[in-house]
Amino acid sequence: MNPYVLMILLSSLGLGTTLTFASSHWLLAWMGLEINTLAIVPLMAQHHHPRAVEATTKYFLTQATAAAMILFASTTNAWITGEWDMNNMSNPIATTMIMTALALKIGLAPMHFWMPEVMQGLDLLTGLILSTWQKLAPMALIIQLSQAIDPLVLTSLGVMSTLAGGWGGLNQTQLRKILAYSSIAHMGWMIIILQYSPQLTLLALATYIFMTSAAFLTLKLSSATKINTLAMTWSNSPTLTVTTALILLSLGGLPPLTGFMPKWLILQELTKQGLPLTATIMALAALLSLYFYLRLCYAMTLTISPNTTNSTMPWRVKTTQTSLPLTISTTITLSLLPVTPAILMLAT
């Protein structure tokens, strides 16, 4: 893609998200979401491949539906209350409709079916943008709306997303689909705690972005899109294989790694709020996700693909990818747990 066109598209992505962040008026927020969607569509369709075009079409239709619902609900709210202000959402029907539309935008269950299909048709870097940057604007709106939404709706969305994300990823062999289901599960963790502690939602979102960035950039470096490709990475780059396995375990939320921190704090907060049953369901759903991450680790470290050469030094191609973003995101993904008290002090 022409670098000038790419610069314009990435600037538009940033502009759309910033516009939504800064707005307190529903029309401006809607406009920001639309700019965001229109900026990423050419990036998704840049590889002229039937799968990419199909994924782009599915994504565009989904986002257009969600945007139309937001516009309709905010117009209804303005018609009833006489205000377009976000903080004045007194109509429960309009509020629930907007929450449904935003859940469709970020892929919360049961509106998550588009996400794995779209992710499968994209290359890894566009998939990274879809999994991280595209979640920011809708999440900002959800956080602003959180006090007006029925707590039962948020809890239902959170539990369903965590279960759907864990359950859906069990049978997958494509890494992009696995990461899409992982994204759905993580969104569930953010939504479940939103009404009790928005700071924990932001913390979970930040750690999710770093962990997902590390996972996507690692897979991009090793050009892996399927599980059986992972089995061949050991001979090419042993260090990268070790860090990849640790990143996946961090995504699963295993203790000495960063991914454990948001899960631990969210379960603790749920228990404090007198919701031990919800906390137990969330912890059990996290085990489902952990299973498919362990499957990937097993395929990568404990199996050897029949295509691997037996020589001690196989052919290694020098990569042209810049390694600094991968280094930073990997370091954060693996080593942030000891500074949890400091992060908590900053968050509260």
Image (cartoon, helix red, strand yellow):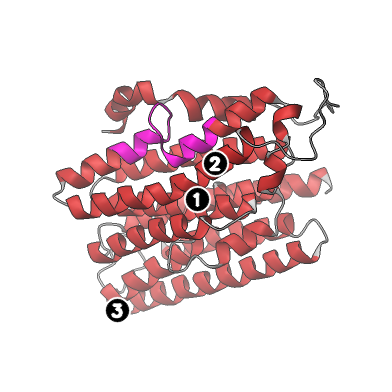
Identity of the residue drawn at 39% across and 59% down: 163
Nearest to N terminus: mark 3 or mark 1: 3
Using the rendered view, name the quadrant where residue 51 is placed.
bottom right
Q: Nearer the viewer, mark 2 or mark 3?
A: 2
Q: Which mark is residue 133?
A: none
Q: Nearer the viewer, residue 26 or 99?
A: 99
Q: Is residue 50 visible?
A: yes
Q: Which residue is mark 2?
A: 212
Q: Amino acid at mark 3?
A: Ile
Q: Element type at marker 3? A: helix
Q: Is residue 125 visible?
A: no
Q: Which mark is residue 80?
A: 3
Q: Judge from the rendering whether residue 97 lies leftward or rightward of residue 40; answer left or right.
A: left
Please give the range of residues in magenta.
246-264
Q: Which residue is mark 1?
A: 182
C-alpha distance separating marks 2 and 3 = 41 Å
In the rendered view, would you say 279 is above or below 309?
below
Q: Nearer the viewer, mark 1 or mark 2?
A: 1
Q: Element type at marker 2? A: helix
Circle 1/circle 2 CB separation < 8 Å = yes
Q: Amino acid at mark 1?
A: Ser
Image position, residue 11 (x, y; %):
66, 46
Nearest to N terminus: mark 2 or mark 3: 3
